């Protein structure tokens, strides 16, 4: 599934007279949002981030996120996803999304899910006590924001997030920090999928390496220690030295990028342009 469209209403600089939405259409691959300074490019990404990652420290704040010209009203963002494969997991999302849409009163015969679309809406409202209420749901065709059965909604949201991979990268982010973030998990999953045979072979070699180190290098030492210590402390039946070897995921996340021009150096010592180009290349691969 990929992000096909974003509709924003009442978020920072993204508003008109409060009646319409600011819409963005996206393609399947790499997309770019361009425009002059202070036109709201970052605000689009920030609202997507809020909708998909509402963790502590990344939450909606009416004092700064509601447009200055508005002292009332809700803010919302609708993310339209296109289901693009016949994988079992996406078929499951489509099945349960359709069931949920059918549970909404007044839904038309054809659902968004029938067209392979999921319209995920996140709405922020201010309660009487001034606190923020966050509500997330999927839209049913022809019914606006009308809701269906909560238990079905909860289940389809769980399936959507299981399929969804979201990583927020900040401009100029240190590559080491990047590879230690959720981006590393995504990269590992891509490699494991696209290079499955090679990944399995490396996993097997790692296990053989651990076994060889333990049996041929550490086992004689363990036996020696067991014999001597056991003579002093009869209650000790044996000792074992277990090698600590990084997992394949950890090896990938800790990998260094070396760039060779006049001299070979690590990527962190290169300029912003080179670092940005490498990141862009990684994103294109994904």
Image (cartoon, rainbow, N blue to C red):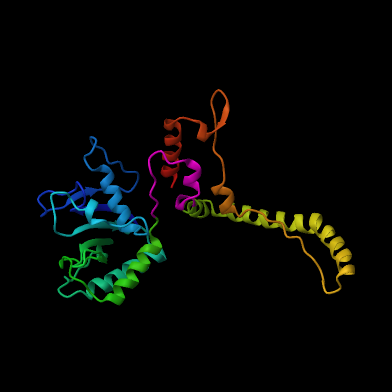
Residue 282 relative to residue 230: left or right: left
Question: Residue 145: x and y, percent?
Answer: 18, 66
Which of 115/129 is in front? 129
Is there any visible trace of residue 229 in the rendered image?
Answer: yes
Is there any visible trace of residue 26 in the rendered image?
Answer: no
Q: Is residue 117 above or below residue 283?
A: below
Which of 231/4 is in front? 231
Question: Residue 21: x and y, percent?
Answer: 16, 52
Instruction: Please check the rendered image and state whether residue 130 is part of the magenta-colored stretch, yes or no.
Output: no
Which of 275/195 is in front? 275
Q: Which region shows up in magenta?
A: 166-184
Residue 210 relative to residue 119: left or right: right
Instruction: Please check the rendered image and state whether residue 174 is part of the magenta-colored stretch, yes or no.
Output: yes
Q: Is residue 166 above or below residue 102?
A: above
Question: Residue 284: x and y, percent?
Answer: 41, 43
Q: Is residue 268 above or below residue 224?
A: above
């Amino acid at each position: 599934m990929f992000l096909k469209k974003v509709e924003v209403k009442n978020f920072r600089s993204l508003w008109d007279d409060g009646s319409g939405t600011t819409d963005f259409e996206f393609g399947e691959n790499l997309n770019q949002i361009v425009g002059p300074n202070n036109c709201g490019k970052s605000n689009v990404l920030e609202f997507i981030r809020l909708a998909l990652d509402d963790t502590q420290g990344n939450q909606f704040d009416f004092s700064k996120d509601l447009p200055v010209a508005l002292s009332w009203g809700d803010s919302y963002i609708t993310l339209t996803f296109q289901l693009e494969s016949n994988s079992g997991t996406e078929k499951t999302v489509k099945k349960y999304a359709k069931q949920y849409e059918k549970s909404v009163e007044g839904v038309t015969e054809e659902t968004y899910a029938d067209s392979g679309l999921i319209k995920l809406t996140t709405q922020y409202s201010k309660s009487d006590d001034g606190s923020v209420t966050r509500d997330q749901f999927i839209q049913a065709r022809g019914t606006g924001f009308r809701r269906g059965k909560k238990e079905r909604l909860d289940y389809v949201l769980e399936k959507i997030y299981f399929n969804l991979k979201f990583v927020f990268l900040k401009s100029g982010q240190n590559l080491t920090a990047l590879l230690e973030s959720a981006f590393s998990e995504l990269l590992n999953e891509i490699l494991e999928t696209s290079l499955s045979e090679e990944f399995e072979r490396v996993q097997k070699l790692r296990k053989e390496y651990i076994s060889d180190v333990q049996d041929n290098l550490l086992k004689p030492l363990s036996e020696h220690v067991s014999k001597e210590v056991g003579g002093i402390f009869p209650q000790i039946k044996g000792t074992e030295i277990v090698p600590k070897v990084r997992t394949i995921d950890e090896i990938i996340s800790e990998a260094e990028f070396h760039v060779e021009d006049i001299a070979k150096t690590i990527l962190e010592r290169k300029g912003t342009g080179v670092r940005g180009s490498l990141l862009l290349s990684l994103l294109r691969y994904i």
